[in-house]
Amino acid sequence: MLFLSAALPAAANAVPKTTERSKQKQAAEAQRADLRQKLDQLKHDISQTETEKDSASDALADSEAAVSKATRSLRDLGAEQQQTEAKLAKLAKQHDELSKTVAMQQTQLANLLRQQYVAGNEDRIKLLLSGDNPNRINRDLQYMGYVSQAQVKLLEALRANLAAVEANQTEAQDAKDDLDEIAQEQRDQKNLLEKEKAKRAALLTQLSSKLASQRKEAGNIERDDQRLSGLVDKLAQLIETQKKADAAAAAAREKLRQEQLAQAAAKAQAALERRRLLEQQRQLADQARKPPAADNQAKPGPAGPSQAGPIPAGPKVANPDAIDDDQPPPARNELTPEAGSAYGKPFDSLRGQLRLPVRGDVMARFGSKRGDGPSWKGLFIRTPEGSEVKAVAAGRVVFADWLRGFGNLIIVDHGNQYMTIYGNNQALLKRPGDAVKTGDVIASAGNSGGNEQSGLYFEIRHQGRAFDPLGWVTTR
């Protein structure tokens, strides 16, 4: 008897199960290690040239970065939970359908066996030795063959569906294990987030007067701008260096492919020549074995291969790209986007079509004075804490970390040396290397970096130079 809903309890001392989700997370973290190392080195290069080390906002750095990380983890876990729950619901539906099919097949098989038993369970030997009409015997034997085939097919289908039920149960259990793991991680991240928010609030209260005075110092503002410009310039250099490395690797790979094509063509031509020579030798041997005929001595023999006209061309390579598929692709860094895949339309064609990354009131505009300090190089959009910040265009995240003066900062590269910059965020929801599409949520607005108001600082830069974002956004 099959019990579809039975489940074996795990032993108390069982070894903790390593889920597929855990393996995927470990692989993803390993791939990001090199990129994180390069970005950390960039930050170190920028900060080591600074003489000021007592900025009040630096005391908030670890706390604000931890709040960002915990918030992003919670958001990622929520998305994972939705996907896993959808998968579990799909598996439950498949389980119900399979259970109904198995029950129906079991009923059919029981009916067949019952009918066979009622019919006397006559086998073929008894039928052949019965001495009955040969035509009737032949007809009954055919019927019995059809019944046997139906039984075999039904049994095979039943076995296959039983195996599918077992696989479904295993996959459903794996999904439940993933959900349990996600739920535990969510509880841990919520506790961590609450602790970090409390820690940040205490630090803000403690440093409020110092932050207020430092925000008014023109020298601090100037250094913040220089720090951001230095970061953008170094990121641009890193991207261009990677592009050149990718181009060189692609050229080397193309050269290798052409050499392989030439070698393949030479081998094909040599094989053709060998076949032609062997065919000539075979025909000459056949002619030598034939007895001479008097009436054919004066007539020319059949044309051999050397008289048959031009040699046909060698076989063409059906798919040149298929040659030496084992060669590894050129190495790439996640800072460099796939050509055309991450960017969509060229950024410079989007003038007048962009939307601001967050809804709110524009409190500071490009070019306006910042007290006694330098002019604003972007926009400050006041918006409630936690508001969604969206990418204004497709691209790839090249920086997502805390930076003095800008708090939790995210920078998106859009190709052709265009970058968009989003600062003062509460949380960064994307990581360096992530490809983003227009309208993707990449952060949540806040007041990190010691900002007085909750909102978003937004810049657009080309070749490292900032320009007015309002000249690029639509008024619709």
Image (spheres, rainbow, N blue to C red):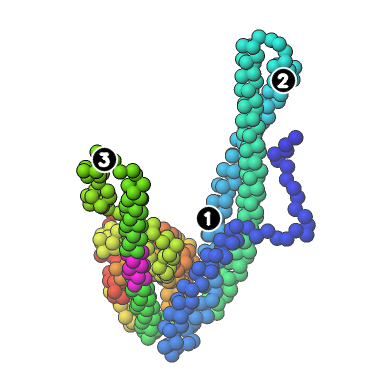
Which label sits on residue 294? Answer: 3
Question: Residue 262: x and y, percent?
Answer: 32, 63
Towards the viewer: 366 or 369: 366
| Residue that badge 2 annotates | 125
* Residue at 36%, 67% in the rendered image: 256
Badge 3: few (under 14), some or many (20 or more) residues near its Cα, within 10 Å?
few
191 on left or right of 71: right
Towards the viewer: 296 or 401: 296
What's the CA distance linking mark 2 and mark 1? 66 Å
Look at the magenta stretch and give its main secondary structure.
helix
Task: Say if 449 sits above or below 304 in the image.
Answer: below
Q: What amino acid type should be assigned to the residue bearing mark 2?
A: Ile
Instruction: Report if residue 271 lies within the magenta region.
Output: no
Task: Say if 346 sits above or below 403 in the image.
Answer: above
* Residue at 65%, 48% in the rendered image: 170
Q: Which residues are magenta?
A: 248-261
Which label sits on residue 79? Answer: 1
Q: Earlier in the sequence, mark 2 or mark 1?
A: 1
Q: Secondary structure at mark 2?
A: helix
Query: Do tag 2 and tag 1 residues touch (Cβ < 8 Å)?
Result: no
Question: Residue 135: x and y, percent?
Answer: 62, 11
Badge 2: few (under 14), some or many (20 or more) residues near its Cα, within 10 Å?
few
